[in-house]
Image: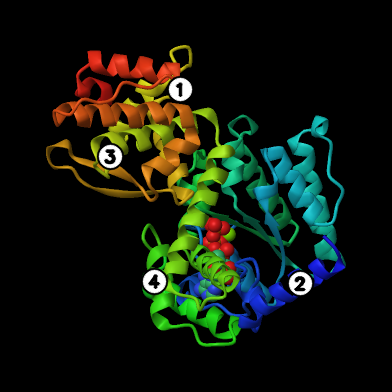
Amino acid sequence: MNKKDIENIISKIQKENKAYSKKSLLDPMVFSGGVIGRQNEAEQFIRFLLGYKQGFVVPLISVYGRSGAGKSTLVRFVLENLDVEFCFVNLRKAKTVFGCANLILSELGASPIKSAQGINMVVQQIGDVLENILVTKKLNFFIIVLDEADVLFYDKRGKPSDFVYKLTVLEENLRTKGYLLCVVMISNSALYDYDLDDRVRSRIGSSEVFFEPYKKEDVLKILHARAKDAFKIKIDDSILEHCAYLSSLGHGDARRAIDLLRVAAQVASIKGEKISKTHIDMAQDELQQDRIEKVISSASFHFRLVCGALARVTFLTDSEWHSTSTIFKQYSKILPKDTKILSYRRISELLSDLENTGLVISQTGSRGRHGYGTQYKLAVSPEMIGRNVDDKWWKTIVEAKISHLASSSGTTFPAPNSGMLKHLRKTLEETNRMTWENYVGL
Ligand SMILES: Nc1ncnc2c1ncn2[C@@H]1O[C@H](COP(=O)(O)OP(=O)(O)OP(=O)(O)O)[C@@H](O)[C@H]1O
Ligand SMILES: [Mg+2]
Protein backbone atom coordinates (compact mmCIF):
# COMPACT_ATOMS: atom_id res chain seq x y z
CA MET A 1 0.00 0.00 0.00
CA ASN A 2 1.25 3.46 -0.77
CA LYS A 3 0.17 7.05 -0.07
CA LYS A 4 -2.09 7.04 -3.13
CA ASP A 5 -4.03 4.02 -1.79
CA ILE A 6 -4.70 5.82 1.48
CA GLU A 7 -5.89 8.87 -0.46
CA ASN A 8 -8.23 6.67 -2.47
CA ILE A 9 -9.67 5.10 0.68
CA ILE A 10 -10.22 8.57 2.18
CA SER A 11 -11.97 9.87 -0.90
CA LYS A 12 -14.15 6.73 -1.07
CA ILE A 13 -15.25 7.17 2.57
CA GLN A 14 -15.82 10.89 2.05
CA LYS A 15 -18.05 10.07 -0.87
CA GLU A 16 -20.02 7.63 1.29
CA ASN A 17 -20.42 10.31 3.97
CA LYS A 18 -21.91 12.78 1.51
CA ALA A 19 -25.37 11.37 2.25
CA TYR A 20 -25.26 12.78 5.78
CA SER A 21 -25.63 16.32 7.03
CA LYS A 22 -25.10 15.38 10.70
CA LYS A 23 -24.10 11.75 11.04
CA SER A 24 -23.65 11.98 14.83
CA LEU A 25 -27.45 12.09 15.20
CA LEU A 26 -27.49 8.42 14.23
CA ASP A 27 -25.52 7.58 17.34
CA PRO A 28 -27.91 6.76 20.21
CA MET A 29 -25.24 7.98 22.65
CA VAL A 30 -25.51 11.46 21.20
CA PHE A 31 -28.36 13.53 22.58
CA SER A 32 -30.43 15.04 19.81
CA GLY A 33 -31.34 18.11 21.83
CA GLY A 34 -34.94 17.38 22.72
CA VAL A 35 -37.21 14.71 24.12
CA ILE A 36 -40.21 13.63 22.09
CA GLY A 37 -43.37 12.94 24.11
CA ARG A 38 -43.02 11.54 27.65
CA GLN A 39 -44.88 14.55 29.14
CA ASN A 40 -46.66 12.42 31.77
CA GLU A 41 -43.46 10.80 32.98
CA ALA A 42 -41.72 14.18 33.12
CA GLU A 43 -44.60 15.67 35.09
CA GLN A 44 -44.67 12.81 37.59
CA PHE A 45 -40.93 13.05 38.09
CA ILE A 46 -40.87 16.83 38.49
CA ARG A 47 -43.79 16.67 40.96
CA PHE A 48 -41.77 14.35 43.22
CA LEU A 49 -38.74 16.62 43.09
CA LEU A 50 -40.37 20.00 43.50
CA GLY A 51 -41.55 19.02 46.96
CA TYR A 52 -38.20 20.43 48.11
CA LYS A 53 -39.63 23.92 47.75
CA GLN A 54 -42.09 23.02 50.54
CA GLY A 55 -39.29 21.46 52.57
CA PHE A 56 -40.20 17.85 51.82
CA VAL A 57 -38.89 15.46 49.23
CA VAL A 58 -39.18 11.68 48.90
CA PRO A 59 -35.86 9.99 49.73
CA LEU A 60 -36.01 7.48 46.88
CA ILE A 61 -37.55 7.59 43.43
CA SER A 62 -37.66 4.47 41.29
CA VAL A 63 -37.64 5.22 37.56
CA TYR A 64 -38.13 2.01 35.64
CA GLY A 65 -39.00 0.55 32.27
CA ARG A 66 -37.57 -1.48 29.43
CA SER A 67 -34.32 -0.80 27.63
CA GLY A 68 -34.43 2.07 25.17
CA ALA A 69 -37.60 3.56 26.71
CA GLY A 70 -35.93 6.94 27.17
CA LYS A 71 -35.42 6.82 30.96
CA SER A 72 -31.83 8.08 31.13
CA THR A 73 -32.51 10.68 28.44
CA LEU A 74 -35.59 12.11 30.13
CA VAL A 75 -34.17 12.13 33.68
CA ARG A 76 -31.05 13.93 32.53
CA PHE A 77 -33.01 16.37 30.38
CA VAL A 78 -35.39 17.26 33.22
CA LEU A 79 -32.59 17.76 35.74
CA GLU A 80 -30.55 19.89 33.36
CA ASN A 81 -33.56 22.13 32.93
CA LEU A 82 -34.52 22.41 36.59
CA ASP A 83 -32.70 24.73 38.87
CA VAL A 84 -31.29 21.93 41.06
CA GLU A 85 -27.90 20.49 41.91
CA PHE A 86 -27.43 16.85 40.89
CA CYS A 87 -24.89 14.16 40.20
CA PHE A 88 -25.56 11.53 37.54
CA VAL A 89 -23.78 8.22 38.16
CA ASN A 90 -23.94 5.33 35.71
CA LEU A 91 -23.36 2.19 37.75
CA ARG A 92 -22.74 0.00 34.70
CA LYS A 93 -19.03 0.57 35.16
CA ALA A 94 -19.14 -1.00 38.66
CA LYS A 95 -19.23 -4.73 39.43
CA THR A 96 -19.99 -4.81 43.14
CA VAL A 97 -22.02 -2.83 45.66
CA PHE A 98 -18.75 -1.49 47.04
CA GLY A 99 -17.69 -0.46 43.53
CA CYS A 100 -21.01 1.36 43.07
CA ALA A 101 -20.52 3.25 46.33
CA ASN A 102 -17.01 4.23 45.29
CA LEU A 103 -18.25 5.34 41.88
CA ILE A 104 -20.74 7.71 43.55
CA LEU A 105 -17.91 9.07 45.62
CA SER A 106 -15.69 9.70 42.63
CA GLU A 107 -18.51 11.29 40.61
CA LEU A 108 -18.96 13.65 43.56
CA GLY A 109 -15.33 14.61 43.08
CA ALA A 110 -13.75 12.67 45.99
CA SER A 111 -11.07 9.98 45.93
CA PRO A 112 -12.21 6.36 46.10
CA ILE A 113 -11.80 4.35 49.29
CA LYS A 114 -9.96 1.02 49.65
CA SER A 115 -12.29 -1.95 50.10
CA ALA A 116 -10.65 -2.90 53.41
CA GLN A 117 -12.19 0.22 54.96
CA GLY A 118 -15.67 -1.18 54.42
CA ILE A 119 -18.94 0.04 52.97
CA ASN A 120 -19.89 2.11 56.06
CA MET A 121 -16.82 4.21 55.55
CA VAL A 122 -17.73 4.96 51.90
CA VAL A 123 -21.31 5.88 52.79
CA GLN A 124 -20.07 8.16 55.55
CA GLN A 125 -17.65 9.74 53.12
CA ILE A 126 -20.47 10.28 50.57
CA GLY A 127 -22.41 12.07 53.34
CA ASP A 128 -19.43 14.29 54.25
CA VAL A 129 -18.74 15.21 50.63
CA LEU A 130 -22.42 16.00 50.01
CA GLU A 131 -22.61 18.20 53.10
CA ASN A 132 -19.50 20.00 52.00
CA ILE A 133 -20.96 20.66 48.50
CA LEU A 134 -24.24 21.93 49.98
CA VAL A 135 -22.46 24.23 52.46
CA THR A 136 -20.03 25.59 49.84
CA LYS A 137 -22.73 26.22 47.25
CA LYS A 138 -25.18 27.51 49.85
CA LEU A 139 -27.86 25.00 48.82
CA ASN A 140 -30.23 22.82 50.77
CA PHE A 141 -31.20 20.20 48.15
CA PHE A 142 -29.19 17.62 46.22
CA ILE A 143 -30.14 14.79 43.86
CA ILE A 144 -28.09 11.69 43.22
CA VAL A 145 -29.12 9.73 40.12
CA LEU A 146 -28.04 6.09 40.05
CA ASP A 147 -28.51 5.03 36.44
CA GLU A 148 -28.51 1.32 35.52
CA ALA A 149 -29.06 0.60 39.20
CA ASP A 150 -29.82 -3.05 38.35
CA VAL A 151 -26.06 -3.62 38.67
CA LEU A 152 -26.31 -3.20 42.44
CA PHE A 153 -28.59 -6.21 42.71
CA TYR A 154 -26.29 -8.54 40.79
CA ASP A 155 -23.91 -8.50 43.74
CA LYS A 156 -25.89 -10.63 46.16
CA ARG A 157 -22.94 -10.99 48.54
CA GLY A 158 -22.52 -7.22 48.72
CA LYS A 159 -25.97 -6.86 50.40
CA PRO A 160 -27.56 -4.39 47.95
CA SER A 161 -30.66 -3.91 50.08
CA ASP A 162 -28.51 -2.89 53.01
CA PHE A 163 -26.66 -0.38 50.88
CA VAL A 164 -29.89 1.24 49.66
CA TYR A 165 -31.04 1.37 53.28
CA LYS A 166 -27.79 3.10 54.25
CA LEU A 167 -28.45 5.74 51.60
CA THR A 168 -31.88 6.40 53.11
CA VAL A 169 -30.30 6.71 56.57
CA LEU A 170 -27.85 9.18 55.06
CA GLU A 171 -30.80 11.16 53.76
CA GLU A 172 -32.36 11.18 57.25
CA ASN A 173 -29.11 12.37 58.83
CA LEU A 174 -28.80 15.20 56.31
CA ARG A 175 -32.43 16.14 56.91
CA THR A 176 -31.77 16.62 60.65
CA LYS A 177 -29.13 19.15 59.60
CA GLY A 178 -31.58 20.99 57.34
CA TYR A 179 -30.53 19.47 53.99
CA LEU A 180 -32.64 17.45 51.59
CA LEU A 181 -31.34 14.54 49.52
CA CYS A 182 -33.19 12.52 46.90
CA VAL A 183 -31.78 9.36 45.34
CA VAL A 184 -33.20 8.55 41.90
CA MET A 185 -32.65 4.93 40.91
CA ILE A 186 -33.12 4.09 37.22
CA SER A 187 -33.52 0.41 36.39
CA ASN A 188 -35.25 -2.01 34.05
CA SER A 189 -37.52 -3.45 36.73
CA ALA A 190 -39.31 -1.57 39.51
CA LEU A 191 -37.09 -1.12 42.53
CA TYR A 192 -39.91 -2.64 44.53
CA ASP A 193 -39.44 -5.95 42.67
CA TYR A 194 -35.84 -6.40 43.70
CA ASP A 195 -34.88 -8.31 46.77
CA LEU A 196 -35.23 -5.46 49.26
CA ASP A 197 -36.11 -5.60 52.91
CA ASP A 198 -39.15 -3.92 54.36
CA ARG A 199 -37.20 -0.96 55.77
CA VAL A 200 -36.33 0.05 52.20
CA ARG A 201 -39.71 -0.87 50.68
CA SER A 202 -41.56 1.39 53.08
CA ARG A 203 -39.32 4.28 52.04
CA ILE A 204 -39.95 3.82 48.34
CA GLY A 205 -43.69 4.04 48.97
CA SER A 206 -45.36 5.08 45.77
CA SER A 207 -42.57 7.24 44.40
CA GLU A 208 -42.21 5.40 41.13
CA VAL A 209 -42.15 6.60 37.54
CA PHE A 210 -42.89 3.88 35.02
CA PHE A 211 -41.88 4.22 31.38
CA GLU A 212 -44.22 2.21 29.19
CA PRO A 213 -42.39 0.64 26.25
CA TYR A 214 -42.75 2.81 23.16
CA LYS A 215 -45.36 1.97 20.61
CA LYS A 216 -44.34 1.77 16.98
CA GLU A 217 -45.74 5.28 16.35
CA ASP A 218 -43.62 6.77 19.19
CA VAL A 219 -40.46 5.16 17.82
CA LEU A 220 -41.38 6.47 14.39
CA LYS A 221 -41.58 10.05 15.70
CA ILE A 222 -38.15 9.71 17.32
CA LEU A 223 -36.73 8.30 14.08
CA HIS A 224 -38.30 11.06 12.01
CA ALA A 225 -36.73 13.73 14.17
CA ARG A 226 -33.26 12.14 13.93
CA ALA A 227 -33.44 11.31 10.23
CA LYS A 228 -34.61 14.81 9.30
CA ASP A 229 -31.38 16.37 10.58
CA ALA A 230 -28.99 13.48 10.04
CA PHE A 231 -29.43 12.99 6.28
CA LYS A 232 -29.16 15.44 3.41
CA ILE A 233 -32.01 13.85 1.53
CA LYS A 234 -35.41 12.93 2.91
CA ILE A 235 -35.64 9.27 3.90
CA ASP A 236 -38.74 7.55 2.67
CA ASP A 237 -41.46 7.20 5.32
CA SER A 238 -41.90 3.52 4.50
CA ILE A 239 -38.24 2.89 5.37
CA LEU A 240 -38.49 4.61 8.74
CA GLU A 241 -41.72 2.73 9.38
CA HIS A 242 -40.04 -0.59 8.67
CA CYS A 243 -37.27 0.38 11.06
CA ALA A 244 -39.79 1.36 13.76
CA TYR A 245 -41.72 -1.87 13.15
CA LEU A 246 -38.67 -4.13 13.55
CA SER A 247 -37.46 -2.36 16.68
CA SER A 248 -40.91 -2.56 18.27
CA LEU A 249 -41.50 -6.27 17.71
CA GLY A 250 -40.57 -7.21 21.26
CA HIS A 251 -41.00 -3.90 23.02
CA GLY A 252 -40.49 -0.44 21.57
CA ASP A 253 -36.80 0.29 21.89
CA ALA A 254 -35.72 3.71 20.59
CA ARG A 255 -32.02 2.89 20.90
CA ARG A 256 -32.38 -0.18 18.74
CA ALA A 257 -34.34 1.80 16.15
CA ILE A 258 -31.64 4.48 15.89
CA ASP A 259 -28.94 1.80 15.67
CA LEU A 260 -30.85 0.03 12.91
CA LEU A 261 -31.12 3.19 10.87
CA ARG A 262 -27.42 3.98 11.32
CA VAL A 263 -26.20 0.51 10.32
CA ALA A 264 -28.62 0.36 7.38
CA ALA A 265 -27.44 3.76 6.13
CA GLN A 266 -23.86 2.58 6.45
CA VAL A 267 -24.52 -0.65 4.52
CA ALA A 268 -26.31 1.34 1.79
CA SER A 269 -23.62 3.99 1.45
CA ILE A 270 -20.80 1.43 1.26
CA LYS A 271 -22.67 -0.23 -1.60
CA GLY A 272 -23.30 3.18 -3.16
CA GLU A 273 -27.06 2.55 -3.00
CA LYS A 274 -30.04 4.53 -1.79
CA ILE A 275 -31.20 3.25 1.60
CA SER A 276 -34.02 0.71 1.29
CA LYS A 277 -35.93 -1.84 3.38
CA THR A 278 -33.43 -4.52 2.34
CA HIS A 279 -30.65 -2.52 4.01
CA ILE A 280 -32.77 -2.29 7.18
CA ASP A 281 -33.20 -6.08 7.15
CA MET A 282 -29.46 -6.59 6.63
CA ALA A 283 -28.77 -4.21 9.49
CA GLN A 284 -31.24 -6.11 11.68
CA ASP A 285 -29.33 -9.40 11.07
CA GLU A 286 -26.00 -7.76 11.77
CA LEU A 287 -27.16 -6.09 14.98
CA GLN A 288 -28.90 -9.22 16.26
CA GLN A 289 -25.76 -11.27 15.74
CA ASP A 290 -23.70 -8.63 17.57
CA ARG A 291 -26.17 -8.46 20.44
CA ILE A 292 -26.35 -12.23 20.85
CA GLU A 293 -22.56 -12.49 20.88
CA LYS A 294 -22.29 -9.68 23.41
CA VAL A 295 -24.96 -11.05 25.73
CA ILE A 296 -23.84 -14.67 25.59
CA SER A 297 -20.09 -14.09 25.77
CA SER A 298 -20.44 -12.09 28.99
CA ALA A 299 -23.13 -14.33 30.51
CA SER A 300 -22.72 -16.67 33.47
CA PHE A 301 -22.73 -20.43 32.85
CA HIS A 302 -26.32 -20.91 34.06
CA PHE A 303 -27.53 -17.91 32.07
CA ARG A 304 -26.08 -19.55 28.95
CA LEU A 305 -27.84 -22.78 29.84
CA VAL A 306 -31.16 -20.95 30.16
CA CYS A 307 -30.58 -19.39 26.72
CA GLY A 308 -29.70 -22.82 25.36
CA ALA A 309 -32.74 -24.42 27.03
CA LEU A 310 -35.16 -21.99 25.39
CA ALA A 311 -33.41 -22.25 22.02
CA ARG A 312 -33.45 -26.06 22.19
CA VAL A 313 -37.12 -26.44 23.06
CA THR A 314 -38.14 -23.78 20.50
CA PHE A 315 -36.17 -25.48 17.76
CA LEU A 316 -37.20 -29.06 18.59
CA THR A 317 -40.91 -28.43 19.11
CA ASP A 318 -41.35 -25.68 16.49
CA SER A 319 -43.52 -23.80 18.96
CA GLU A 320 -42.66 -20.27 20.01
CA TRP A 321 -44.06 -19.71 23.51
CA HIS A 322 -42.80 -21.69 26.48
CA SER A 323 -43.69 -21.48 30.14
CA THR A 324 -41.16 -20.96 32.93
CA SER A 325 -41.72 -24.56 34.06
CA THR A 326 -41.00 -25.96 30.57
CA ILE A 327 -37.82 -23.89 30.35
CA PHE A 328 -36.83 -24.99 33.84
CA LYS A 329 -37.31 -28.64 32.81
CA GLN A 330 -35.19 -28.08 29.68
CA TYR A 331 -32.54 -26.36 31.75
CA SER A 332 -32.43 -29.35 34.16
CA LYS A 333 -32.15 -31.68 31.18
CA ILE A 334 -29.14 -30.00 29.62
CA LEU A 335 -27.41 -29.23 32.93
CA PRO A 336 -24.15 -31.21 33.21
CA LYS A 337 -24.52 -34.02 35.75
CA ASP A 338 -21.85 -32.74 38.12
CA THR A 339 -23.28 -29.19 38.26
CA LYS A 340 -25.48 -27.99 41.09
CA ILE A 341 -28.91 -27.05 39.84
CA LEU A 342 -30.22 -23.53 40.44
CA SER A 343 -33.63 -23.08 42.04
CA TYR A 344 -36.79 -22.56 40.01
CA ARG A 345 -37.02 -19.03 41.42
CA ARG A 346 -33.47 -18.22 40.31
CA ILE A 347 -34.22 -19.50 36.81
CA SER A 348 -37.26 -17.24 36.60
CA GLU A 349 -35.05 -14.31 37.66
CA LEU A 350 -32.58 -15.24 34.93
CA LEU A 351 -35.44 -15.29 32.43
CA SER A 352 -36.36 -11.73 33.43
CA ASP A 353 -32.72 -10.72 32.98
CA LEU A 354 -32.74 -12.42 29.60
CA GLU A 355 -35.84 -10.46 28.66
CA ASN A 356 -34.05 -7.23 29.55
CA THR A 357 -31.37 -8.03 26.99
CA GLY A 358 -34.07 -7.89 24.30
CA LEU A 359 -33.38 -11.45 23.11
CA VAL A 360 -36.56 -12.75 24.66
CA ILE A 361 -40.16 -11.50 24.94
CA SER A 362 -42.63 -12.45 27.64
CA GLN A 363 -46.37 -12.50 28.07
CA THR A 364 -48.36 -13.17 31.16
CA GLY A 365 -51.81 -14.52 30.77
CA SER A 366 -54.22 -17.27 31.48
CA ARG A 367 -53.10 -20.77 30.60
CA GLY A 368 -56.56 -22.28 31.01
CA ARG A 369 -56.69 -24.86 33.75
CA HIS A 370 -52.98 -24.26 34.51
CA GLY A 371 -53.87 -20.81 35.86
CA TYR A 372 -51.87 -17.65 35.17
CA GLY A 373 -48.24 -17.81 34.20
CA THR A 374 -45.46 -16.16 32.28
CA GLN A 375 -44.49 -17.50 28.90
CA TYR A 376 -41.35 -16.69 26.96
CA LYS A 377 -40.53 -16.50 23.30
CA LEU A 378 -37.21 -15.88 21.57
CA ALA A 379 -37.03 -12.55 19.74
CA VAL A 380 -34.30 -13.99 17.49
CA SER A 381 -33.94 -17.34 15.77
CA PRO A 382 -33.13 -20.34 18.01
CA GLU A 383 -30.26 -21.26 15.67
CA MET A 384 -28.54 -17.95 16.31
CA ILE A 385 -28.77 -18.45 20.07
CA GLY A 386 -27.89 -22.15 20.01
CA ARG A 387 -24.80 -21.68 17.87
CA ASN A 388 -23.54 -18.96 20.18
CA VAL A 389 -24.19 -20.94 23.35
CA ASP A 390 -22.16 -23.90 22.10
CA ASP A 391 -21.68 -24.66 18.45
CA LYS A 392 -20.87 -28.38 18.83
CA TRP A 393 -23.77 -28.97 21.21
CA TRP A 394 -26.12 -27.16 18.83
CA LYS A 395 -25.00 -29.36 15.93
CA THR A 396 -26.08 -32.47 17.84
CA ILE A 397 -29.53 -30.96 18.29
CA VAL A 398 -29.85 -30.05 14.64
CA GLU A 399 -28.74 -33.54 13.58
CA ALA A 400 -31.18 -35.17 16.00
CA LYS A 401 -34.04 -33.15 14.58
CA ILE A 402 -33.08 -33.97 10.99
CA SER A 403 -32.82 -37.62 11.94
CA HIS A 404 -36.22 -37.53 13.61
CA LEU A 405 -37.87 -35.77 10.66
CA ALA A 406 -36.26 -38.20 8.23
CA SER A 407 -37.34 -41.27 10.17
CA SER A 408 -40.86 -40.02 10.70
CA SER A 409 -41.23 -39.25 6.99
CA GLY A 410 -39.84 -42.66 6.02
CA THR A 411 -36.64 -41.42 4.38
CA THR A 412 -33.43 -42.91 5.67
CA PHE A 413 -31.13 -40.44 7.22
CA PRO A 414 -27.57 -40.70 5.90
CA ALA A 415 -25.15 -42.07 8.48
CA PRO A 416 -22.85 -39.41 9.89
CA ASN A 417 -19.76 -39.31 7.71
CA SER A 418 -16.30 -39.88 9.09
CA GLY A 419 -15.64 -36.20 9.37
CA MET A 420 -18.51 -35.70 11.75
CA LEU A 421 -17.88 -35.26 15.43
CA LYS A 422 -17.74 -38.37 17.54
CA HIS A 423 -20.06 -37.05 20.21
CA LEU A 424 -22.53 -36.10 17.50
CA ARG A 425 -22.79 -39.72 16.43
CA LYS A 426 -23.21 -40.75 20.04
CA THR A 427 -26.12 -38.36 20.49
CA LEU A 428 -27.72 -39.68 17.37
CA GLU A 429 -27.42 -43.25 18.63
CA GLU A 430 -28.92 -42.16 21.91
CA THR A 431 -31.71 -40.39 20.09
CA ASN A 432 -32.50 -43.45 18.10
CA ARG A 433 -32.77 -45.50 21.27
CA MET A 434 -35.09 -42.95 22.87
CA THR A 435 -38.51 -41.86 21.84
CA TRP A 436 -38.58 -38.39 20.34
CA GLU A 437 -40.66 -37.12 23.27
CA ASN A 438 -38.00 -38.37 25.65
CA TYR A 439 -35.29 -36.65 23.70
CA VAL A 440 -37.14 -33.36 23.64
CA GLY A 441 -37.86 -33.76 27.31
CA LEU A 442 -41.25 -32.17 27.72
N1 LIG B 1 -38.59 10.43 23.90
C1 LIG B 1 -37.44 10.47 23.24
N2 LIG B 1 -37.14 11.52 22.46
C2 LIG B 1 -35.97 11.54 21.79
N3 LIG B 1 -35.05 10.59 21.82
C3 LIG B 1 -35.30 9.52 22.59
C4 LIG B 1 -36.50 9.40 23.34
N4 LIG B 1 -36.49 8.24 24.00
C5 LIG B 1 -35.34 7.65 23.69
N5 LIG B 1 -34.61 8.41 22.84
C6 LIG B 1 -33.30 8.07 22.30
O1 LIG B 1 -33.18 6.65 22.34
C7 LIG B 1 -31.93 6.23 22.89
C8 LIG B 1 -32.17 5.37 24.11
O2 LIG B 1 -32.76 6.10 25.16
P1 LIG B 1 -32.28 5.97 26.67
O3 LIG B 1 -30.81 5.71 26.74
O4 LIG B 1 -32.78 7.15 27.43
O5 LIG B 1 -33.06 4.66 27.12
P2 LIG B 1 -33.12 3.96 28.55
O6 LIG B 1 -34.56 3.81 28.91
O7 LIG B 1 -32.25 4.67 29.52
O8 LIG B 1 -32.55 2.51 28.22
P3 LIG B 1 -31.64 1.52 29.15
O9 LIG B 1 -32.59 0.88 30.13
O10 LIG B 1 -31.12 0.51 28.17
O11 LIG B 1 -30.58 2.33 29.78
C9 LIG B 1 -31.17 7.51 23.17
O12 LIG B 1 -30.34 7.76 22.10
C10 LIG B 1 -32.22 8.59 23.24
O13 LIG B 1 -31.71 9.81 22.81
MG1 LIG C 1 -30.47 4.17 30.40
Which residue is denoted by mark 2 in the rendering?
Answer: 8
Q: Earlier in the sequence, mark 3 or mark 4?
A: 4
Q: Secondary structure at mark 2?
A: helix
Q: Earlier in the sequence, mark 2 or mark 3?
A: 2
Residue 135 lies, with reference to residue 416, above or below; the image says below
- Image point 81% across, 72% down: which residue? 7
Which residue is denoted by mark 3 in the rendering?
Answer: 322
Q: Ligand 2 falls in which quarter?
A: bottom right
- CA separation, marks 3 and 4? 28 Å
- CA separation, marks 4 and 1? 43 Å
Q: Secondary structure at mark 4?
A: helix
Residue 300 lies, with reference to residue 362, above or below; the image says above
Which residue is denoted by mark 4 in the rendering?
Answer: 242
Residue 419's disc number: 1
Q: Mark 4: few, some, or many residues within 10 Å (few <14, many ≥20)?
A: many
Taking the view exactly as shown, the residue that stands out farthest to the bottom is: 233
- Image point 65% across, 49% down: which residue? 92
- CA separation, marks 2 and 3? 53 Å
Q: Amino acid at mark 1?
A: Gly
Residue 239 lies, with reference to residue 344, above or below; the image says below
Q: Earlier in the sequence, mark 2 or mark 4?
A: 2
Is the residue under label 4 in contact with that under label 3 (CB below 8 Å)?
Answer: no
Is the residue under label 3 in contact with that under label 2 (CB below 8 Å)?
Answer: no
Q: Amino acid at mark 4?
A: His
